[in-house]
Amino acid sequence: MIKAFKELGHYLDVTCHVIKMAAMTIIEYPANIAGWMISNPLQFIMGFAIIKFVVEAFGEVGGWNYGQLAFLYGLSVISHALSMIFFVQGWFMGYFVIEGDFDRYLTRPLGVLYQFFFTNINIFGVTDLIPGILVFVYGCIKCSIHITPLFILQIIVTLIGATLIRGGIYILLGSTSFHTRSATDFGQYTQEIMDKTTMYPISMYPESLQFILTYLIPIGWVSFYPVSSMLGIENNMYNGMLLPLVTLLVGILVMCLAGGYFTLGLAKYESAGN
Amino acid sequence: MIKYLYIVKTQIIKSLTYEFNVYGNILMQTIIMITSAYFWKALYRNQSVVAGVDEQSMLTYIIISSALSVVMFTNVERRIEQSVIKGTVATDMMKPVNLFGVYLAEDIGSIIALIFQNMIPILLIGGIFIKIPKMADIRDLPLFIFSVLISFLINWLIAALFGMLSFTAVNIDALIQVKKHLLRLLSGSIIPIWFFPEIVANVLRALPFVYIYQLPISIYIGKGDRLEQIAQMKIQFLWLIVLFALFFAAQHRITRKVLVQGG
């Protein structure tokens, strides 16, 4: 027991240091900082503007009005930002595999997955967080939501679950590189699919697709189900902790699966040049 | 010329190496295309015509947009960035070929491979699962192909210009992202700008992005009359000339800069 605590303390210690290091390395290229500062908010501001234009041209989207869509979009962007901070490396796992970069991690006395994600922690993800929070607050105002402790708890639990689901999916996709020996950057495609399925209500898709998004690839839980429960849409008037907790559970499940698949892949890893 | 054709050939062979990438890309693009199709179907549930376009045309639009995204593949910006970061740019420039000609040849090679690996499967899948993307008026075909060629060049020149920024900024990952988002949202590749409010749409019509995706697809689905399309193609051509001028000016500056630093 004491040993476990000591180890946890050690990990926390290392985490503090790597975050400091990550902060220092990003200052290396000033133009890059400026670029991220523009690029990430720009992407989401434009995405949100498009929702507005679409709603103006077509009326409601799948029975959701503008305020509700803003709420959904904001929450989805926040969880996207969190997954960008912690798990974006999953997109580039293939490059690590074919260039043999896991060698370094394997020789150190820390978990490989931990090192992979935390030594490359992406502090720039914060630039995604800001537009997300802005849109989310706007959505809250539009839906005239009363901020209660229950609501805040629902949001926090949902966000943790959603971030884990997203991160788990990135790890699962990245780990395929161990078996295929190729570096495919599915980042952009994953992003595009996630955009379509988390920023708009999935109830607009046909039943078969909804089934896939609920049970097979549980993206529906990232934002759609918890939000429709919180806002009381889609005949789902239950306004408690149940759906956020399910999101959290799904997140943990996906993460466990991803971790298992990664470990399986790592057993096949044989460095570069073999 | 033979030299560049040889590079094209090598690049085609290179692109054929990784099989999994091909299936992965097709799968991902199919998912994106089908979700977009349902997205538009849901939007058109209560309306038949919005902004002068009906549901069937919109479905054709997204299939053609997915297929066109293959032609808009560029790697030139990454290649320039890598050669600057690794410092090989000086020796690359000494080779008896035009460096940017090599990059263009490589991209053309990749695209030729992608047409078979990606574009044809996507058109088939789209035709089977969504609808057959029939052209509105087959007589517009030469016009369509011509405007796609100009689109490709505009897209490539924009990418090359962004790539050249790495001579001053070195690491341009973020700037590449900026370009990607601008292109994705402002070119009409996801949502055509005719659904945007009038003011925004007018601003976008003055920028080069809409002429990359939206103009060729508009011709394909027969949106607007011939005169309107010709007028837009004139602007497209104007942008091509402007971008070429910018490109040559930038190339000149960069070559001088590298020569000065190289000794």
Image (tube, rainbow, N blue to C red):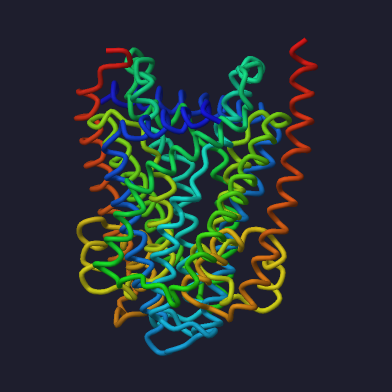
Depth check, front residue: B62 or A158: B62
Give x and y (percent) for residue A100.
36, 18
Q: Position of residue B261 (x, y in %)?
A: 77, 15
**Image quarter for residue A64?**
bottom left
Please, is residue A183 above or below residue B44 in the view?
above
In this rendering, the count of numbered labels is: 0
Residue ID at (44%, 48%): A188
Left or right: residue A253 versus residue A195 is left
State which quarter of the image contains the N terminus of chain A: top left
Which residue is at the front of the view, A45 or B149?
B149
Q: Quadrant of residue B9?
A: top left
Where does residue A149 sit, x and y in percent of width and height?
45, 65
Residue B165 lies left or right of residue B185; in this view the side is right
Q: Give coordinates of residue A198: x percent, y percent.
A: 39, 62
* Near-viewer residue (B24 or B97): B97
Classify residue B81 as left or right of residue A243.
right
